[in-house]
């Protein structure tokens, strides 16, 4: 299991130290939540802050866009060369076009499904994706309770991925901890985003390791 701690739960008063700590603690990706205050009822950080994160992070960036205008935000964040940029299927009328744009920028495209969205909604996009992110909370705020139906959804998605694109990863974001990590792995999940579980721990490295099963 790959682990991508979300910096949404970090102490922004010492953000450099917080980024270095998770990288030194053995994380696989650094998850960056970008919210515009329109698609979700919260606002987070822009490219100036993320550029500072990129300078100190020794692990690749995983940028999750929770925005209405995906193309605008991709243009802002693409110069930082993240490994992945994920966008919500619920906010995009032309997902193939966005996927192709990300490919042209040498960024791995990923699509996000909110808790209510079905994996079948992206069946005909899977062959063009590197990752699908399943939200196990409603997006917008950290520290929410895990929505258990995502386990069933991950299993359904895994079947579709095996059919269309076995190399596509499944990522889950929201309420992930050491109590549900085995169930997620058994469902076929490859990557987990963990914010409050990692940044709320006294030892970030131990928390990350407990998820890398």
Image (spheres, rainbow, N blue to C red):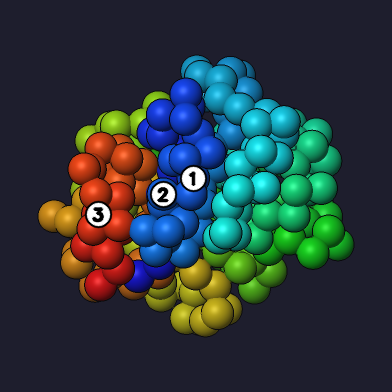
**Is the C-beta separation of discs 1 and 3 under 8 Å?**
no
Residue on which the image places disc 3: 207
Residue 200 visible? The answer is yes
Q: Residue at x 47, y 81 (%)?
A: 162
Whole-angstrom CA distance, mark 2 to mark 3, is 12 Å
Indicate the secondary structure of the residue bearing disc 2. Answer: helix
Quadrant for residue 82, please give it: bottom right
Within-10-Å neighbours for mark 3: few <14, some 14–19, many 20+: many
Whole-angstrom CA distance, mark 1 to mark 2, is 5 Å
Please tell me whether residue 201 is drawn above or below residue 72 in the rendered image: below
Indicate the secondary structure of the residue bearing disc 1. Answer: helix
Q: Nearer the viewer, residue 152 or 64?
A: 64
* Residue 64 location (% of width, % of height): 57, 44
**Is the C-beta separation of discs 1 and 2 under 8 Å?**
yes
Within-10-Å neighbours for mark 1: few <14, some 14–19, many 20+: many
Residue on which the image places disc 2: 21
Residue on which the image places disc 1: 19
Within-10-Å neighbours for mark 2: few <14, some 14–19, many 20+: some
* Residue 19 location (% of width, % of height): 49, 45
Q: Residue at x 79, y 64 (%)?
A: 106
Whole-angstrom CA distance, mark 1 to mark 3, is 15 Å
The quarter in which the N terminus is drawn is bottom left
Taking the image as shown, residue 101 lies to the left or right of residue 151, namely right
Q: Nearer the viewer, residue 121 or 198?
A: 198
* Residue 16 location (% of width, % of height): 53, 38
Q: Earlier in the sequence, mark 2 or mark 3?
A: 2
Q: Residue furthest right?
A: 104
Q: Residue at x 22, y 62 (%)?
A: 210
Please tell me whether residue 124 is drawn above or below residue 7 in the rendered image: below
Taking the image as shown, residue 208 lies to the left or right of residue 112, namely left
Please tell me whether residue 89 is drawn above or below residue 43 in the rendered image: below
């Amino acid at each position: 299991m790959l682990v991508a701690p979300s910096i949404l739960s970090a102490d922004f008063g010492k953000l450099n130290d917080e980024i270095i700590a998770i990288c030194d603690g053995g994380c696989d990706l650094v998850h960056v939540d970008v919210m515009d205050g329109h698609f979700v009822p919260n606002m987070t950080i822009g490219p100036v802050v993320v550029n500072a994160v990129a300078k100190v992070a020794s692990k690749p960036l995983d940028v999750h866009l929770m925005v209405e205008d995906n193309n605008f935000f991709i243009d802002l964040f693409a110069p930082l060369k993240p490994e992945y940029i994920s966008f919500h299927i619920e906010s995009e009328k032309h997902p193939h076009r966005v996927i192709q744009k990300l490919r042209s920028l040498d960024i791995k495209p990923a699509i996000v499904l909110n808790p209510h969205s079905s994996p079948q909604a992206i069946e005909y996009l899977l062959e063009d994706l590197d990752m699908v992110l399943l939200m196990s909370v409603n997006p917008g705020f950290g520290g929410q309770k895990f929505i258990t139906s995502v386990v069933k959804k991950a299993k359904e998605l895994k079947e579709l991925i095996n059919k269309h694109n076995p190399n596509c990863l499944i990522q889950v974001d929201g309420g992930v901890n050491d109590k549900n990590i085995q169930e997620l792995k058994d469902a076929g999940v490859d990557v987990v985003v963990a914010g409050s579980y990692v940044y709320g721990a006294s030892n970030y490295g131990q928390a990350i390791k407990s998820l890398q099963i």
